[in-house]
Structure formats: C-alpha cells, structure tokens
Amino acid sequence: MHISNPSLKNKPHFTILDGLRGVAAMIVVAFHIFEPNASSSHDQIINHGYLAVDFFFILSGFVIGYAYDDRWDKLTVGGFFKRRLERLQPMVIMGMIIGALLFYYSDSPKWPLIHTIPIWSVILTMIIGFTLLPMPPAFDIRGWQEMHPLNGPGWSLFYEYIANILYALGLRKLSKTALGILVAIFGLYLVYYAVTSPSGDLMGGWTFNYEQLHIGFTRLLFPFFGGLLLSRMVTIGKLSNSMLISSLMISAILFMPRIGGEENRWMNGLYESLSIVLIFPLIIYIGASGQVTGKIGNKVCKFLGDISYPIYITHFPLIYLYSAWISKNPNAGISQKIAYGGLTFLSALLIGYFTLKFYDEPVRKWLRKRFGNA
C-alpha cells in the first residue's frame, strides 16, 4: 500500500497520493472507533469506511505499475519480492507484537473466553501472524473468526501479498488489451457480487473460509489490477486543487450513509461497487495529476503518507480495547464514549508515529544496507 521507493530517482513522486493514503487511513481508524457503538450497519457512522481497503488496493496497483512496469529488464522476481517484504513486513511484525501484548486486556463480555487462552497459544498465534499465513477459524483465539486474531487488518496485507505475487509471476506480462479484458471481467463480477449479495455490501474477507475468501478475492482483483491498468493507460494531466478535490471525494465516498435500507439492499451494493469501479480510479487520476505547492503542503502530504501504513497496521489492537470497554460499560454516556474514543484515536496516531520513527524506518534502513536494493 505504499508508493515510495528510494531508488526511483528519475520519476516524479505522487505527493498527493501519499496524502490521500493518509487521509483514508485515518478515516479507517475513526470508522473502527464508531463501529462498536453502532447497533447495525445501517446506523454506523462513517458508514462505508471499510471501502478504504479497496481504495488502498487500487492505489497499490497503480503505484506498483508506475514504479516497476518499466524496470523488469533490470529487476528480478526475487528482487521485487525483497523490496516488497522490506517495505511491508517490518510493520506486519510490529502489529502482531502489539496485538499480543494487549491481547489479555481485551477480556470482556464481548470476548469472554480470552482469559482462558494459554500464553503459549498467544505466542504461537503471534509467530504465525509474522508470516501472514492465515489461521482457520478452528484456531481463532479471540472469537471473531479472524485469520489474524491478534491484529485483524493483517487480512488485507495477506491479499496484498497475493496480488504482488500474481503481478510478479505473470500478470505483469499481459498486454494492455489482455489486462483490460481481465479487469473488465473482474469489474463486472464485482458489481454483480455486490448487487446480489444478501448483505448488500462488500464488507468481509478476513476469515479463512470459502465465503470470506470469495469476498476477499472479489475485493482484491478488480482494484489491484484495475489500478495497474490505470497506470499503463492514463496520461497524467495538470489539475489545480487536486489534493482538496480528491480528499473531499474519498471522504464523501467513505462517509456516505448506507443506501436503500433493509428493503433495497442491492442499492447499497450498487453504490459500493460503482464507487470502486468508477470513482476510485477517478480520485487517483485527480490526485496523480496535481502538485502540492509550498513547503507546508508538501510536509503535510509527506507526513500523511509516511504515517498511513503504520497507523493502519497497528491501530486495531487499540480497537479491541475500545470495543471491550464499550461491552463492559453498556450504560456509558456519550461524553465518556467520545472521550475514550478520542483517546483511542490519539493513541493510534502516536503509536503509528513512534513505530514509524523508532522502528520501521531504522529497520528498513538496516535491511537496505544489509541486503541491498537489488
């Protein structure tokens, strides 16, 4: 989900896309804070916040195509995988460690069996989590049927890695026409699935079973390879106020209330699928077509881009704690919920920042020095 690459010195950097990734990541954190306060998906605030994952997928496909498509005469498959592991894996490990350290603190009516889980099982789950290998529901130690029960968002990195593998091992070789046909098929199926889904939405993908894997791959294939196709076909323009326009667009999509109600769930599915198929590529085009002027604007976008992945991959253990507190305090007033939710959001920002500066960046620097950039 990250676009920067220190070796791409001759290509312009999409600063606004960095900023958009940070905006979407913070909306995800807010979405997860509101989630335990909702009685159903219909009254959830920031109702479509989970679509940020689909936005991350299409952004990832776009920037990977931009960064690597014209470099395979010098780049090996092994070198590509090494770069992606260097970029993503350190924070995967950190997210699992934080999840393990905070696991027992989420013991609550929501997860009443946590105190019965032996520590060896938590440690084993953490070690497996380091690899991002999915755990089946039978080995779930929390009770939410997550493939990564110590840090739920690991599921999206699992799919991100699969997309990277598919790209490197063959799909990068497809012509624009062949890729376009494939993307059209993926897109049509995404719309069909969303419109006919009993839930009327695209939420899911985090459980290692057929149903959830079906959702996960449906959410992955069009966005990632649609982003890849976009990077090959679009001619980047020059637009004014791109950061403002694209930020407002992604925020509007994610904040949109649920559409259609119980009687017309297909309407919500249509909204979500068309947002992914039509609006998200437009947002990326607008973001890629603009430039940030001034030092402050560039610093803000850089900060948002730098912190986006650390926030995304480390915030969810705090959401477990907040959800546990909500379940233990069902009569808590709105002021208490706001205070605790605000503290959770601030803590997520601080943990994201400190893990970036004192862990992620030093570790990646060491890895580049130790193993090179080949």
Image: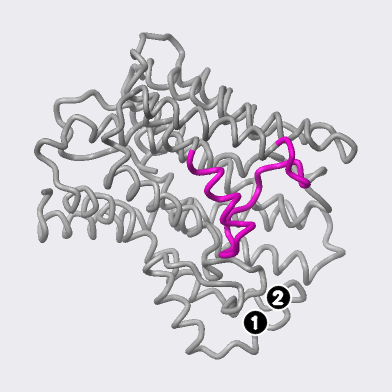
Tell me the SS state at disc 1.
helix
| Res 350 seen here | no
| Res 42 seen here | yes
- In depth, the one of 216 and 185 nearer the eye is 185
Which residue is located at x 39 percent, y 52 percent?
162
Which residue is located at x 28 percent, y 56 percent?
85
Which residue is located at x 50 percent, y 20 percent?
282
Is the C-beta separation of discs 2 and 1 under 8 Å? yes
Q: Position of residue 330 (x, y in %)?
A: 84, 65
Q: Position of residue 299 (x, y in %)?
A: 34, 31
Q: Position of residue 311 (x, y in %)?
A: 46, 51
Which residue is located at x 62 percent, y 65 percent?
320
Q: Which residues are magenta?
A: 195-221
Residue 75, picture quadrant: top left
Residue 97, picture quadrant: bottom left
Instruction: Report the number of discs.
Output: 2
Quickly name the residue at label 2: 111
Is 43 magenta? The answer is no
**Residue type (three-letter) at the residue carrying disc 1:** Ile
Residue 188 located left or right of residue 164: right
**Residue type (three-letter) at the residue carrying disc 2:** Trp
Quickly name the residue at label 1: 114
Residue 281 located left or right of residue 37: left
